[in-house]
């Protein structure tokens, strides 16, 4: 993107070139826009805003086989929005908020928006989708049906859940993004994949040693920089199988388990030490005190400072 455009990339910690990432791009309405928009070869979430629209159509490209999932966040008149696949113009109507497009990158999708727009784009590699499909008991998914302006309530809801975190300093960790990609991927396979069921999947949880190993790895990587694939490998399971078995065993996802573990660790530090809240926040895996305070209040119902004062006062009386 032209350097005159306002681009803010989320500072998501990454452990490798294959780590998922999020990006928030805000065009200023004056900068020239490239004719091609290239995504990384991994799962990505990109929010793209423009107050003036695009002067010409953009071709979207991926270095690996992948699906492009695009969700509008605001309405667009039908006369100001066009989509092409394989150089064929797709009929479109008025764009309502949270309508979805699902298009294979192999068809070289092109789009044009002639007025202000706000979109979230997901780039979902086919390799990850194939792994999920195998674990779900489907055969190989060779094709995905084209969807344009689909009223997909699932994609709309999960987009609403991730939207507040795009562009923030405490962007989702790679562990959270891994978990998010599994949820989105499973839905895409079942809703848009041309599939046939081949086997029943196991609904069992983790073995005792796998539960211990997963807990150890999460505790050792409290900041969430570890990939879901690394934990799954440590338990001898595929990513999708591990994620499902972990939730069966613990009743929550790895990301939510880790968040609760951070809060429990912070409570221990607040009750047993005189450390400052900023130091406790960092030692408990949060990027800063603001993120710590926000998450603590959401889960506990009060601020960390108030919780600490109440705890100390309770044990003094």
Image (cartoon, rainbow, N blue to C red):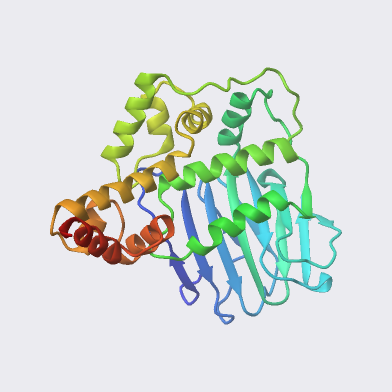
* Residue at the image point whose x is 57% and y is 75% from the top: 32
Residue 158 position within the rendered picture, expressed as x and y whole percent measured from the top left: 61, 52
Looking at the image, residue 91 lies above or below residue 249: below
Residue 294: x, y in percent? Answer: 39, 63
Displayed quadrant of residue 48: bottom right
Q: On the picture, is 314 further left or further right than 159?
A: left
Q: Is residue 124 visible?
A: yes
Residue 313 placement: quadrant: bottom left
The answer to whether residue 18 is seen in the rendering is: no
Residue that protrudes farthest toward the front in the picture: 317
Residue 260 picture location, percent across and down: 37, 46
Residue at x 68%, y 17% (from the top left corner): 199
> In the image, residue 307 lies at what x, y percent?
29, 61
Q: Is residue 164 left or right of residue 232?
A: right
Q: Quadrant of the C terminus?
A: bottom left
In the depicted view, which residue is nearer to us: 280 or 233? Answer: 280
Query: As displayed, is residue 49 above or below residue 105?
Result: below
- Left/right of residue 19 with respect to residue 267 in the rendered view: right
Residue at the outermost bottom position: 30
Q: Is residue 225 left or right of residue 100?
A: left
Q: Residue at x 46, y 28 (%)?
A: 249
Instruction: Examine the rendered structure and indicate whether residue 35 appears above or below residue 183.
Output: below
Number of on-image labels: 0
Between 296 and 164, the residue placed more toward the observer is 296
Please identify the quarter of the rendering in which residue 99 is found. Answer: bottom right
């Amino acid at each position: 993107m032209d350097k005159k455009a306002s681009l803010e990339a989320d500072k998501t910690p990454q452990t490798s070139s294959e780590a998922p990432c999020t990006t928030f791009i805000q065009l200023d309405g004056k900068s020239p826009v490239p004719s091609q928009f290239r995504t990384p070869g991994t799962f990505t979430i990109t929010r793209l805003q423009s107050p003036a629209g695009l002067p010409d159509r953009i071709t979207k490209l991926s270095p690996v086989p992948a699906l492009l999932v695009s969700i509008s966040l605001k309405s667009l008149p039908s006369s100001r929005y066009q989509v092409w696949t394989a150089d064929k113009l797709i009929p479109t109507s008025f764009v309502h908020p949270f309508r979805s497009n699902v298009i294979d990158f192999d068809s070289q999708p092109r789009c044009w928006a002639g007025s202000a727009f706000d979109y979230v784009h997901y780039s979902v590699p086919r390799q990850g989708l194939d792994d999920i499909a195998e674990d779900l008991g489907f055969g190989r998914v060779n094709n995905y049906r084209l969807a344009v302006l689909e009223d997909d309530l699932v994609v709309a809801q999960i987009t609403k859940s991730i939207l507040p975190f795009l562009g923030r300093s405490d962007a989702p960790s790679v562990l959270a993004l891994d978990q998010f990609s599994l949820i989105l991927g499973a839905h895409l396979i079942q809703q848009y994949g041309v599939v046939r069921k081949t086997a029943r999947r196991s609904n069992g949880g983790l073995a005792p040693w796998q539960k211990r190993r997963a807990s150890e790895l999460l505790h050792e990587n409290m900041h969430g920089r570890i990939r879901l694939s690394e934990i799954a490998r440590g338990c001898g399971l595929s990513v999708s199988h591990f994620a499902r078995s972990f939730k069966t065993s613990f009743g929550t996802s790895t990301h939510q388990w880790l968040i609760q573990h951070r809060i429990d660790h912070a409570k221990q530090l607040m009750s047993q030490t005189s450390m400052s809240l900023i130091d406790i926040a960092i030692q408990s895996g949060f990027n800063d005190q603001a993120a710590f305070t926000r998450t603590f209040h959401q889960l506990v119902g009060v601020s960390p400072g108030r919780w600490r004062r109440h705890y100390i006062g309770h044990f003094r009386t």
